[in-house]
Amino acid sequence: MTPLRLRRLLRAPLVLAVLFFVAVFAWQLARRPAAEPAARLSPIAALGEQADPAFERALAPRDFDFPRDHGPHPTFQTEWWYFTGHLANDAGRRFGFELTFFRRALAPDAPGGDSAWAARDVYMAHFALTDEARGLFVASERFERAALDLAGSRAEPWSVWVGPWSAESLGADFLPLALRAATARAGLALELAPSERIVPNGERGLSRKGSAAGNASYYYSLPRIAARGTLSLDGETHAVRGEAWLDREWSTSALEADVVGWDWFALTLDDGRELMLYRLRRADGTGAPASAGTWVLRDGTRRELALADFELETLATWRSPHTGAEYPSRWRVRVPSIGVDVEVRPWLADQELALAFPYWEGACDVLANGERVGRAYVELVGYAPVASDSASRAAR
Amino acid sequence: MIRYLELASLRWLLRHRWQLAAAVLGVALGLACVVGIELAARSALASFERQTRALAGRATHTLTAGPEGLDEREYARLVRAFPEVDLAPLAEHEVRARGAETLALVLTGVDPLAEARVRGDALPTIALGDAVRADDAIWLARATARELGIEVGAPLALEIDGRAATARLAGVLDAPNPAAESALRGRAFADLATVQRLCSLQGRLTRVDVVAPSPNALARLEASLPAGSALEAVSARAGELERMSRAMRFNLRALALLALFVGAFLVYDTSTFSVVQRRELFGRMRALGADRATLFATVAHEALWIGLAGSTLGLALGIAVARVLVAPLAQTLTDLYAPVSRVELDVSPAFLAGAAALGVLATLLGALLPAWEAAASPPRQVLARSFFEARARGVVAPLAVLAATFALLAWGLLANTETLFPALLAVFAVFAAAGCGAPAATVLAARLAARAAVAFGGTLERIAARSVEAALSRTAVAVAALAVALGASLAMGTMVASLRGTLSAWLESAVSADVFVWAPHRSASRSDGTLDPGLVAKLRALDGVEQVATTRGVALGGAVDGTFVIASEQPPRSRAGFRFVDGEPERAWADFDAGAVLVSEAFARARSLAVGDALAIPDARAGVSARVAGVFQDYATDRGYVLVARSTYQRWFDDPATSGVGLFLAPGVDPEAVVARIRTELAPERSIGVHSNASLRAATYAVFDRTFAVARALELFAALIAALACVSSLAALEFERARELALLRAEGLDPRGVVRLILGRSALVGVTAAALAVPLGLGLAALLVFEMQPRAFGWTLAWSLDRGALLRVVVLSVAAAVAAGIAPAWSALRSSPARALTEE
């Protein structure tokens, strides 16, 4: 054996050992499974899905029957109670809030069995606060089934709740009522004062969302409800007062197939008038024919608006760091027939609720010729893909 | 110079391939034991922990409420009262699913909406809508569905508390990662409503997982909890198995290290031999100017290569061993402690590097002494072989003193402590004492044998005996290696025999009912399932039943550091079987009936309880405690348990369930006939355990033997390495003496004489090793039986000698030694004396 070969042999164990470690390491790496792309589910698809014929549909105009209609309509599949509002503390610091309760029936009938967990309705609630001075926006959601009083709603005395978040009449009448929601960071306790204004939208409350019969919802609004209470956010607590807006809607099937989302505006003008508009958006960015609005004068007289009556011009856009979606972020709203030509400007660009169903909903100012002439809440749906799918999957 | 030395040393090693192979193999086998055991145990624990964490998701705590479970209305109250705390309710129940295979599954009822906030995307969740639309919808992991051979949409036959039920597979769950995958397996998921309905759990939750955002929130939640409920940290649960099985793994690890220890002996042996053989070379090198450090480095270098080669081989072998061991080990952990399923080997590069380092280090330690010896060689003088042997003989006495010191140390450790670790140190001290005492024993044996040979006139035998002493540096090593390994093997055998003997005696007396029926449960040592009340009533009413014992097992105070309580109706015939280690039986039973508790020995030891002490009962109403009336022998679980009268338990908890029933039959009634009747008429479901006394014992022995299969495998490894050590060192010695033999042959020794001489020498080494191994083994066995076992597991064992193991030690040592002589004898017979004489 030559020295050279001997040397090679000498090195053999070391080389073997190194090779062995490399092999094991490579094997370890190879075993790591590739990350699977998360399944995506569009909220629009959820709302627009083929409805079970066992549910009732919104077919004809309706004379609302209060207080019964403030309560749930279990024969319809979906409904919501949508509270938004603008608040301020004594020093004039402004806050926006959203507290929304959704009900959705998973099946026309309650399941059998004698378990208290057997329930057919799922409730979802969203709670968001905007702190203009600190530039803060926080949002969270809760899901519960309508079982064991975890979530539910009733007409008399009126209430709707999801876990610890609730809206509840304080007496026999619908108003005054109390709103209550809290998370680890934020809390809201408001009392909403009595108000006489109930504004039916669409044709006597029948709000058509498409051309097919039944692609509609029952829809009324309570604008400008005086509100007062306390609000806390990230360690600060404020006594606040202001105005709230309630949107009530229930339906079974609402959206046409080509609708990818909507832009909804609720303008409260300082001169005592209100303007509600929604544009049902198609994939190419144009408004669907069913887009509509309601114009309410100080004396309560109202005027229905059709797509042709209004113009929404996007003046700026904002890209969400949470979902990557691009949202319109400033608008010129024109309704020539009633002489409205205003700019709607968000308090904060980032008022996106990056939740199971991400959307943008935020407090805005209404300006005319650079002067503030009112406030608004704007909702932008269908811009962001569903990010975290576990909650939405669970609720399916 | 170094280069030439290295080349010379390599050439020498290559010329003595068998010696080299034995050394490498010794290290490899020893390390394989350590790696195999450690890797299997570590993987099992890691898998359990990952599963626990995957199941917990974001949850920081778990809320439980004793045997009755938590009232679901309490859950709803907590949800509404604590907006900042996320809660997820669960209802779990053991079921069996029957498809292509029958699988034991935990049917887990979840609220998918709560799952989303507590577990999020960590675990796939079920769709509430599907559950609402079909109240028999269940979900399985994809792999579980495949095992059962059912497709989505197909019905699945379930067995729940011995009743048959049907569910429908609504979907399969794909886990996002392997930990979640193993967490999902072994479980079936359904909506809470479905599980409550299927398992008759209406109104109750098994547990609630809690995500507490801050210690403050947790404290507020804790203050608002209903009486009898307890919060337990998930981190504690994840470490549960680790803590519970610590004593068992400690024992296994000690055994594995022992194997490595014997392997290192082999390296010592090889290195010593190589140094002795090259004494001339080393001496010449020294004379030529090589310094001590160079010689030391040369020998150490050799060991390094042996260590590297052995470790590489050992790692590969160890992984193979772990692959074989992991399933039985997981089964044992499941049998004894907590369910461990689907263990994947956790081979991390860091672990392998650590193990390899251990192997190399052990090898280097083994070569330290020979290397030092080589370095210490004075030039020229070393040329005399006798120099080495003289020096070896010189250390016999100091080593004997050291042996005595180690023995004293062991005694001191045992006498003054009560914990496990000192006892383990004592075990190693005893081994060290045996190792150090081996040269003295060898000298003594050689002299005795020489004297005996003189007395009986055997000249050759006398030469053989004297030459054993003359080659002490090698023979003592062979004796030590063989004695240590065989002693360990004998000790293990005796300990296992003692355990089995004790268990058998205990089964004989304590397991007294003629027929046993119990509900399915996960852990063999903890019967906490529930039997259908209708079945219990029918069992009581069976013909031929004279007395009935019932038990209800519950884990209180959380799974970790909790208390396992068995509420029991104990008829007179059952009571007769109890053996008390503390407390007077009659008094104890009277107190038991009056509300006191009895505790098992392991439980008493773990909690330092004695008769008269008060024991707080977790989960019961605040302040409930019971007096300990007696401590009884029990070998069913090393965690121990508390035995309480059914009536007393009923005062603590509103829990009428029964986990098991023992039937005492009237004289003349055939238990097997009763078993057959129960099987065919009352409980045809396989998940219900129905056993006669005899078959229960057989099943218990089966679990026992499974538990000790790992120990037995290790025992075998140690013996194998020892035999290797013996053959290697003795064969080397004989080959080295070829010249001496040739001389004897030239002087007229006939072939038969050669064989007599060689085999005589070898046999003497074997007998000496056996003579040392037997007392060592028995002493160690006593240490294991009377000290280690009580310290590790909390129970007292009765000594029983394994005669087979004893015989094995003697036969194996002599056989190994004789086997070691065969090849040299054969070679000596075939070689020509003249050539052998001129060759060296």
Image (spheres, coloured by chain):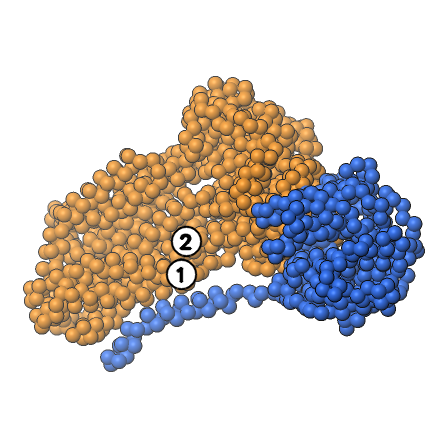
Chain colours: A blue, B orange
Percent x, y for residue B335? 51, 44
B821 versus B646 height, above or below: below
Q: Local crowd at mark 1 within 10 Å, few (<14), some, or many (≥20)?
A: few
Given contact means CB atoms under 8 Å apart, are the residues at marks 1 and 2 in contact? no
**Residue B821, quarter of picture:** bottom left
Q: Which residue is mark 1?
A: B350
For the point 8% across and 63% down, the residue is B378
Assign the N terminus of chain B to one quadrant of the image: bottom left
Q: Secondary structure at mark 2?
A: helix
Q: Is residue A259 visible?
A: no
Q: Amino acid at mark 1?
A: Ala
Q: Which residue is mark 2?
A: B37
Q: Earlier in the sequence, mark 1 or mark 2?
A: 2
Between label 1 and label 2, give the one nearer the viewer.
1
Whole-number angstrom distance, CA of label 1 to CA of label 2: 17 Å
Assign the C terminus of chain B to one quadrant of the image: bottom left
Residue A165 lies left or right of residue B724; in this view the side is right
